[in-house]
Amino acid sequence: MKHSAGWAAIGFLTGGLAIPAHAQEPVTARTPATPLVVHDPYFSIWSFNDKLTGGPTHHWTGSSQQLIGVVRIDGKSYRFMGDEPSLPALPQISRAIWPTHVIYRFQGAGVRLTATFFTPDLPHNLDVLSRPLSYLSWKVSSSDGSPHQVQIYFAASAELAVNDVYQHVVWGTSRVGDMQVMHIGTNTQQVLAKSGDNLRIDWGWADVAVPAQPGASVATIGMNAFNDAVNKGEFPASDDLNMPRMARIDTPVLAARFDLGQVSGTPITRRLMLAYDDRYGIELFHRELPDYWRRGHTTFAQMLLQAEAQRASLNAQATAFDHALVSALTQAGGSKYAQLAVLAYQQTLGATKLAAGIDGEPLLFSKENFSNGCVDTVDVTYPSAPLFLFVNPKLLEAMLRPVLQYAEMPRWPWPFAPHDIGTYPLANGQVYGGAETSEVDQMPVEETGNMLIMMDAIAQAEGNPDFAKPYWPMLTKWAKYLRAFGLDPKNQLSTDDFAGHLAHNANLSIKAILALGSYAQLARMLGHADIANDYQQTAKQMAGQWVHMAADGDHTRLAFNMPNTWSQKYNLVWNRILGLNLFPPSVARQEVAFYLQHQNAFGLPLDYRHTYTKLDWTTWSATLANNQKDFEALIDPLYKFMTETPTRVPLSDWFDTVTGKQVGFQARSVVGGIFIKPLTDKSLWRQWAQGHP
């Protein structure tokens, strides 16, 4: 794939890494927040400011989880991460975001400093992908031709290991190979004791691992002692032993110091690893599951040693992956689209947890962030599915597997698919609506349609129906339900449940019809020709009925019984992607033409009733366009939202199209839906899905 010059707006990788040289160094566009160390719903650290020195680093929920960086140059200290007011900020000159790297550059006091956050999110290496570990490195050189005495200081706060700062923590230091490993956590260690939405982890251990390097030293001390150390240029003689104590009292930190000595024009690099040992991260049907990387009884110490030994190789692989993915996204949708997708990459993965099942099989659990905290919500998986389908459909299999297992249990009594399997991190059964006892506030057409479409999409990506085969009787039951109730849905919720119940929902009907077409495709792939023909004919007839039922002049209705209304028909995108061809191309053309006339400054409203929209769905609606010009016309306002929204949180998917302000939701996996566009190129999709970009 050729590299597009349009990517110059985003940035490129440098900082002591073995990559090709580039002619210039562009700057990443402004984003509402920057992912720094993002792994799962608990281990997720962000910068909410344009500059890394503009404020403390945060957990995605907004709670402070401070990472602090200070550089001492010729006896004077400057902060390059955090907002300690007693220290001046080293001027930041650029920031670049890649799928697996975030790079900040600073220059001042005669020194250049590059700070790199590297998280090896390689989608076909599940062992590495599941490791809760990021590499932090700093490269320093003289910028004025004169030598300078330089020290680098880093600290990770106890806030990383508590839900609130009134909890008590303990800490210590261990030796692992030639590394010094500091750890901190609560003194109670109530593993998997809490479930809910706006929570942070309060069990396990935050770890800072410092490999042997010239001039490296570590200390477990309080924040006051750390601040004193960066001013004096040396750590105290003793660690802080006043524990346990509340995390808010002279906040304990895991600190590292690197004395680089005299720095000239030749760059010097120092590094460490930031990791989290959660022991167990998920409970599935009352069984505690280990992280996927632990499935062979690998210890945390062994994982650290493996990560250190593989660092250079992983960095080279991830750098190549970064460039290939950026090129593919730019090729598929243009530079602005690619920037949205790159920002969505770590966020999508960071809202999930990869665990090992009882037989060591990969199981991927999502959290419905800043909504209700549900686990593996099917209508959250559905919008996030395009990312997984594109970079590795085995990850989507891993996310659907627990839902399918649950739906096969006798305890699930309904002929339709479940909404969720619990409240994160306790995946012990549906909690939404009527759950297992009532059909009230269920989403029968929504979730059933989602499951059948995603099962077909996996088969299309992998070129075979193997994943669907064991579940065929249940898929058949679901298809029968949609055949009976999908064309004209009763009053019920859809994925946009914040908009309330709606009967005769035209967009929901599209989903049911396409799901029946998906079932027909699966039947044909599995050798059930008669079933395939039957359901294909049914879906085609229903699509024809839909065209007449939804018609409303130059567009289609929100609901069949509501003339002079409209809504985004984002579900229609699968008609093209899966080659279903149930709806005539004229429907998509008409819809796109109408959408282009009804946009606001920050995008297309979800429907005529409100000015708010959804980022994922608008990208799907844009993908209905049959030409790049119309696609970009619908994407450009979303790019404007990313670069201009006044709400500084990890990318929100629910915002107002007039003001650009967040309405709700943040840091959710649904932004993986932005990856829908490259799925329209079957050759490109198959190439990436099979791990050969």
Image (cartoon, rainbow, N blue to C red):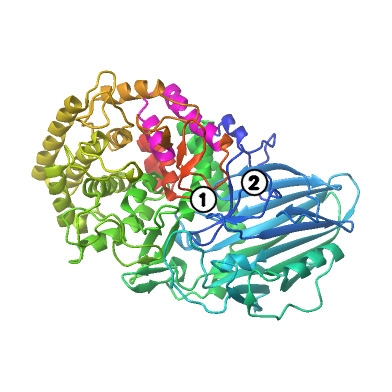
Q: Is residue 524 above or below residue 169?
A: above
**Residue 67's spot in the image, x, y percent?**
66, 60
What's the magenta region? 614-642
In reply to whether residue 113 is colored magenta, the answer given is no
Residue sitting nearer the eye, 37 or 100: 37
Question: Type of residue at label 2?
Answer: Asn
The reply, left or right, for residue 647 in relation to residue 495 is: right
Residue 637 seen in the figure: yes
Q: Residue pushed farthest right?
A: 146
In reply to whether residue 615 is colored magenta, the answer given is yes
Nearer-N-terminus badge (2/1): 2
The reply, left or right, for residue 16 in relation to residue 500 is: right
Residue 1 seen in the figure: no
Residue sitting nearer the eye, 440 or 636: 440
- As helix, strand or loop, the secondary structure at mark 2 comes to loop
- Crowd around label 1: few <14 · some 14–19 · many ≥20 (10 Å): many
**Residue 8's spot in the image, x, y percent?**
62, 33
What is the chief secondary structure element of the magenta stretch? helix
Q: Which residue is mark 2?
A: 49
- Crowd around label 2: few <14 · some 14–19 · many ≥20 (10 Å): some
Viewer-nearest of labels 2 and 1?
Answer: 2
What's the CA distance linking mark 2 and mark 1?
18 Å
Q: Which residue is mark 1?
A: 346
